[in-house]
Image: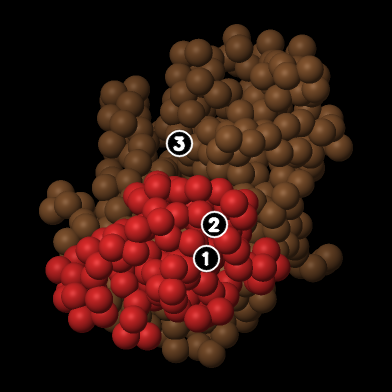
Amino acid sequence: MSDLRYSKDHEYVALDGDVATLGISDYAQSQLGDIVFIELPEVGKKVAKGKEIAVIESVKAASEVYSPVSGEVVEVNPELGETPALVNDDPLGRGWLVKLRVSDAGECASLMDDAAYSSFLKTL
Amino acid sequence: MTEPDVAIAAPPALAKLPLDALHRRLGARMAPFAGYEMPLQYESGIVAETLHTRRQASLFDVSHMGQAILAGAGVGRVLESLTPADLVSLPSERTRYTQLLNGNGGILDDLLVTRLPGVEERLLLVVNAARKHGDFALIRETLRPFDFNPLDRALLALQGPRAAAVLGALLPGAEDLAFMSWRAFDFGGAPLFVSRSGYTGEDGFELSLRAEHAEDLARLLLSHEDVAPAGLGARDALRLEAGLPLYGHDLDEMTDPVEAGLGWSIGKRRRAEGGFLGFERIRRALEQGPSRIRVGLLPQTKAPLREGAELYAPGDELVGHVTSGGFSPTLQRPIAMGYVASNHANVGATLSATLRDKRIDVSVAPLPFVAHRYFKMPVGKDAR
């Protein structure tokens, strides 16, 4: 998981070629609590860095997920419709949200690596 | 991980509960609510805590709520000027649910009133945390010649089908208390007020005692294998499932008790005689039916509807809005409640609701969503 890059809003991306897998960090899922519904974008949707790409509903509240990179949605996690709690159980694995074809891979470089994100969490 | 970020997130003005240290040791995630740092949830989470309450028993710390004693001959009659409940006929050691009303019949707060035993007429009041300062000022002002003493006591709620067995083992006789009745027990030399009441729809008790004894009681109850701590998140889910309105969301100063579905709490004599603030509006609502009513709402999607969502009838007519909404752990589906114009509020009616940039279908449903399981006295046993 060392190739994950994190945003300050607790999203992560894992870049494989020009496709980024996007999800939320373990810290984020623990803060949200029990996740009961996830609104995912349509495949083909274009999203700019920093804009809303999904909405996660926990028992208590709705929270927006912002895309840390710009790109086009090429796939959404088909398991989350039936089992949104996968994001609680395995946020970095089976609980991924969206795959994006990134338009500027350089945007990933400005995100935090594991060590930087761990340090960032300690400041919260 | 929960402790450090909470310490930073909480502004210093927040008050701490008497059991604050215990909550943190139990792994609570604390959140600000009504001026207090409250346990929102513990490690098992809102869904598990809700289900545990429905299946076994949960301990909630509700010490943020306001408790006070009003005393003096005829105090019930005078307090009736602010509430539509029959307080004159309230028997000793019995509890009534009622509302404090403003001059327009709007609800200033909802509260429990218990007539304490003894020769002197004394009423124990339990009010909402966010409203207690205003409530107490109003009561002090209106009932000036009477003794009014806010109590500095912790309040714990033990709720769930196992609550009676657990508490009865600790306080013999508690398991025989009737629903909405009260008794003072002795807990290690300290007076412990026990009321068979709660706000989860389950059987259960509310336990009031001096803060310095509260941790001993909480630890004793939590040491029972059937009891787990539960936070504000579960409490909110439970009361929504039970169709119980929450002040500041489903009840406010613009809302009267009749449209809120609380007409059952208005005393028979009071309906006839009036003599309380806002009687004109309430009499009209009782006679003609309210123009809007509080109903259950079942979204026909998996996405929860939240407070503030607008409700439309066919033809795009705005007919109401959602006042509480979330996910029901017991029913595993979204549930909500809100106010709908009476002519569109029939059970089964289909409305549409705003959800972000979409409209979703919602059906009007009866309340409660999860049946109440309050204690019923076995036939032949004396209610007390």
The C terminus of chain B lies in which quarter of the figure?
bottom right
What secondary structure is found at the residue carrying circle 2?
Answer: strand
Q: Are marks 3 and 1 on the same chain?
A: no
Chain A display color: red
Q: In the picture, one chain is brown; tell me its letter.
A: B
**Could you tell me residue B67's position as x and y percent?**
36, 49
Q: Which mark is residue B281?
A: none
Does label 2 or label 1 sit earlier along the sequence?
2
Residue density around tag 3, few if under 14, some if 14–19, many if 20 or more, within 10 Å: some
- In this figure, which residue is indicated by the disc labeled 3? B248
Q: Residue at x 56, y 79 (%)?
A: A94
Please state which of residues B273 and A85 is positioned toward the viewer in this rendering. Answer: A85
Residue at 32% across, 46% down: B34
In 3D space, how far apart are the residues under numbered discs 2 and 3 (Cα atoms)? 41 Å
Q: Quadrant of residue B221?
A: bottom left
Kind of residue indicated by mark 3: Gly
Are the residues under badges 2 and 1 in a single subunit? yes
Residue B299 quadrant: top right
Q: Position of residue A44 (x, y in %)?
A: 59, 51
Label annotation for residue A73: 2
* SS for dot 3: loop
Chain holding disc 2: A
- Labels 2 & 3 near each other (Cβ < 8 A): no
Residue A114 in view: yes
**How are the colours assigned in the image?**
by chain
CB under 8 Å between callouts 2 and 1?
Answer: yes
Q: Residues within 10 Å of mark 2 (few under 14, many from 20)?
A: many
Q: Image point 19% across, 66% down: which residue?
A: A124
For mark 1, name the chain. A
